[in-house]
Amino acid sequence: MKKVAFIGAGSMADALISGILKNKIVDPHRIWVTNKADHDKLKEMQTQYGVQTTYQLEEIFHDVEIVFLAMKPKDAAVAITRIKKYLTKEMLVISVLAGVAINSIEHLAEKELAIVRAMPNTSAAVGKSATALAINENVSEEQVKLVTKIFGTVGLTAIVEEKQLDAVTGLSGSGPAYIYYLAEAMEKSALDIGLEKNVAKEFIVQTLLGAAEMLSKSSKEPQQLRKEVTSPGGTTEAGIKILDSYGVQNAFIDCIKEATAQSKRLGKAFGAKMEV
């Protein structure tokens, strides 16, 4: 691979660079990183990973094969407009910008490009992301294999239609936050029932890991697994009855639907701004 450029140096860029280097997909000296103005972050990444950093766009785009759009979505329009003259159809453009459609990127670039829109989640930092990939018609089969390999370094990947990405955002893109929210509640309850925080955290984490492993390895549906833990008249049933009385399952369903709707709204708002 000739060269990979990251436009943006936030947590997702950090996670992807870490995964790429751990799996030796490309040498660190072939990875170039820039951002809006955070010099300290670039210096930190250069020290940690041995990557190249610069604010000279001519330098970063020279002989580049893959360009990651990894800035904050609110900065995307300005950033893409600034770099558009360097983008070519021969490059593979990979966007991790939530809510920014492929046609919006092409509109800003004012040219046809080979674009992959990716929706990973923050678990990429520990190699456990669930990443959905949507591609446009300019992306070659070889490029699809390459981008799948790259995101495979930080977890599971799947190719989906772009219209499904809002649903992926609501379900797995925001999903880690829902689990952390649950863990928060479990920690608070542990204190109330007399467990020390450090002991409680260990048990909560192991419980979540174990349940996730059961879901992964078992052929049984989640409902069946739950029922197998829930003995009539037992402690689990007593707890589940409280969850049902508060409508917790319906609340989670509405939560995911609303996050999906918000992703759609953000995408429409971004597109509308460009038409003004």
Image (cartoon, grey):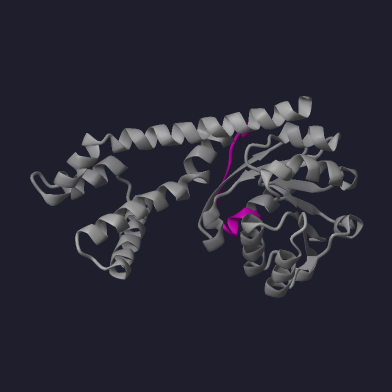
Q: Quadrant of residue 149?
A: bottom right
In the image, is residue 110 above or below residue 234? Answer: above
- Residue at the spot x=74%, y=33% of the render? 104
Quadrant position of the C terminus in the picture = top right
Number of disc labels: 0
Of the 4 image quadrants, the one containing the N terminus is bottom right
Percent of width and height locating residue 71: 71, 50
Answer left or right for 91 relative to 97.
Answer: right
237 left or right of 137?
left
Counting from the top left corner in percent of width and height, residue 54 is at 83, 63
Q: Is residue 167 magenta?
A: no
Residue nearest the viewer, comparing 63 with 52: 52
* Residue positioned most to the front: 192
Q: Residue at 69% x, 42% y: name it.
A: 74
11 or 41, which is in the foreground? 41
Asked which quadrant contains residue 203, the reply is bottom left
In this rendering, does residue 259 appear at all? yes
Q: Does any portion of residue 141 appear in the rendered image?
A: no
240 left or right of 89 in image = left
Residue 56 in the image, given as x and y percentages of width and height: 88, 59
Viewer-closest of 145 and 124? 124
Please give the range of residues in magenta.
149-162
Q: Is residue 102 above or below residue 58?
A: above
On whether residue 155 falls in the magenta region, the answer is yes
| Above/below status of 1 relative to 265 | below
Residue 170 in percent (x, y) is at 50, 38
Q: Residue at x 47, y 40 (%)?
A: 171
Compared across the picture, whether 233 is left or right of 85 comes to: left
